[in-house]
Image: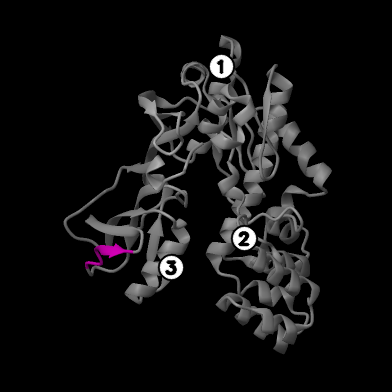
Amino acid sequence: MIKRLPADFLVEEQADLPLRPAGGFRVYALQKSGWTTLDLIRQVAGAARIPLSRISYGGKKDKHGLTTQFIAIRDTRDLEGRGKDFSLRAVGFMDRPMGPDLIRANAFTVTIRDLEDIAPLARAAEEVRQSGFPNFFDDQRFRSYDPERDFFADKILRRHWNGALLVYLTSAAAGSTKKERARLTGIFESWKDWPACLRLAREPYEKTIFAYLLGQPGDFRGALRLIPDEEVAMRYAAFQSHLWNEVLRRMLRLKIKDLEEVKGTEGSYLFWRRLDSGALDWLGTLEIPTAAAKTEFRDDITAAIYADILREAGLRPGAFRTKELRRIGFRSFLRKAMILPEGLKILDSGADDLNPRRKKVRLSFTLLRGAYGTMLIKRLGLAFPAGRKAME
């Protein structure tokens, strides 16, 4: 079991920052727990009375852990300080915003609890050191995805403006309360009765969109443009990640024997235990591009699998040219299919202070930018078939 306490899941961003004595962007180390990166940045922007667009970051960090990352604020005031479950520490200036290109890696220190025996985990860690693990996008990437409503971006690509708006305004995020789910169901059942929807609206963006539709009934395309850019980008990325995961799933089933399956939010995650030298060499060099209007593949097999997935979904590559929401688009980038963690080791082990007569292990490792520490933990969980869910 992980993440019982924030300190059980420590993540520290490692970045190559071009710091200067002075500059237009002040850079901070942001430490947080119990916050998503975006929610906390909104909090900081509101408290400092600056537009959200002036704050930049390189990646989103896990809500359920104690994480440190860098942000840059286009404001030279010293905004260093502390708040509820977060702190900002000024580290210098830059002449540019913070971005993912500056992140080199993320260092993890993870405590795994409620273990009967430590030996299986130690053996699994040795297997991962030698054979790595698949670089799937993990469940955190799909928090905006509601299986009952499907992907927001899928509706956009099909030019189903009403459907896209319905997905955005009625989808229940993972972890939503029963009360919140009931409220969203009420909006779904009242759809196109805009006065009723407006009465059910709670968030400012909901009120803005429903007020617009009250005055412009049926202009769903116009209402979509009221969605914040960051929200659109997050939902586009979720669909891209889903397609990428599906390509990797099919590649692994085609090329690797004896795969083991762990259920995930948008599909199954497939793991191997050990790879022979040929499979290790193949996966070690395999890079899969994310979906966009122009997606370039480095091998014919990956290209054919991707084409099959789009054809089965009834989508064309040209659909990824989202002219209606010009501010945000789909950008293709290459992502490694396999990760070999650096410095994976068990730091210490002993009695679990939260679970009597059980044991805990503390381990550390470093992953390249964009790889999920929770995916490595899922892989280690194969050592405990009866308790895989407890490792998530």
Q: How crowded is mark 3: few (under 14 residues within 10 Å), some or many (20 or more)?
A: some
The mark nearer the N terminus, 3 or 2, is 3
Q: Indicate the secondary structure of the residue bearing disc 1.
A: helix
Q: Quadrant of residue 44?
A: bottom left
Residue 386 appears at what percent x and percent y? 64, 27
Vertical placement of 55 versus 109: above or below?
A: below
Front in this rendered view, residue 287 or 269: 269
Badge number at residue 42:
3
- Residue 196: x %, y % from top left: 74, 84
Instruction: Specify the amino acid type for callout 1.
Output: Leu
Residue labelled with disc 1: 280
Q: Name the residue under label 2.
A: 176
What residue is shown at x 38% (from left), y 64% (from top)?
A: 55
Mark 3–mark 2 CB contact (< 8 Å): no
The span picked out in magenta is: 78-83
Secondary structure beneath dot 2 equals: loop
User: How far apart are the alpha carbons under marks 2 and 1?
Assistant: 40 Å
For the point 40% across and 73% down, which residue is it?
Answer: 51
- Tell me the kind of residue under disc 3: Arg
The disc label shown at residue 78, or none:
none
How is the structure coloured here?
one colour
